[in-house]
Image (cartoon, rainbow, N blue to C red):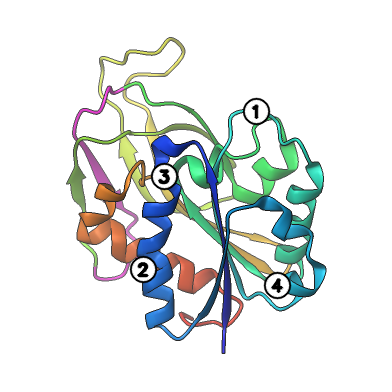
Amino acid sequence: MAKALVVRGGWDGHEPVQTSEIFITALREKGFEVVVSDTRDTYLDEGLMAGVDLILHNWTSWMPPENGAWSMAVQKAVAAGTGLGGWHGGLCDSCRGDTLWYLLTGGQFLGHPNRNAPYRVTFADRPHPITTGLDDFTISGTEQYYMSVDPGNQVLATTTFGLELHEVGCQPGAVMPVVWTRRWGAGRVFYNSIGHTAKDFAVPQVRELTLRGLLWASRSLVVA
């Protein structure tokens, strides 16, 4: 049986419990054993980490991590073949100031200058098991993430910012990756910048591509 480790916490505004529960249920329905932890110290359990096929990291923290060993333990596990997945600030605003975490995840949150205006998400033309069959969509009432992104990512979806932005330094009209995958050693990494709160996953495309992404990242190859 495939095993997933869900580590959740940090800023409550991102609803780490509510959002992760959606995918804990979905992963169990796919046959995963799911271990849930409310402390990052779980990453220091070498025995547990050696047997994990997927890490779902959902922990927003704006300060540099108090214990760099958490990040290093995740990097080591993914390099050995464990998958890593997550969304929004829970993955890419989690260890601010940790450059290796940026390289592991493929990006870092910088701002959300659209003030929750509706925005369009467009899937890449080339097919991928995470996005195949899904239609472009518009999402509203949530944050459109402006990010620093590794050019080595495989970008699966993008969004285009409007011409009136409300944060200095963000470029009007910028085309920004929303969903991507990348490799870290033998492991696969999936990220979706949507997922500010649980209601974002009520949009069918958002929930489906996120679940597909987690399955794709898993070492168990649930999705080829």
Magenta highlight range: 114-133
Q: Do the residues labelled 4 and 1 touch (CB within 8 Å)?
A: no
Judge whether residue 52 can be spotted in this image. Answer: yes
- Alpha carbon distance from label 3 to label 4: 23 Å
Q: Which residue is identified by label 4?
A: 81
Q: Which residue is identified by label 2?
A: 127
Is residue 101 part of the magenta span, yes or no?
no
Which mark sits nearer the N-terminus, 3 or 4?
4
Residue at image point 33% right, 44% down: 197
Residue at image point 41% right, 83% down: 30
- Of 122 and 75, the residue lying toward us: 75
Q: Is residue 114 left or right of residue 10?
A: left
As helix, strand or loop, the secondary structure at mark 1 comes to loop
Residue mark closest to the camera, 1 vs 3: 1
Residue 45, x across and y down, in percent: 78, 65
Q: Which residue is identified by label 3?
A: 193
Judge whether residue 190 can be spotted in this image. Answer: no
Residue 38 lies in what quarter of the image?
Answer: bottom right
Kind of residue indicated by mark 3: Ser
- Of 90 and 127, the residue lying toward us: 90
Kind of residue indicated by mark 4: Gly
Residue 124, x across and y down, in percent: 34, 55
Kind of residue indicated by mark 2: Pro
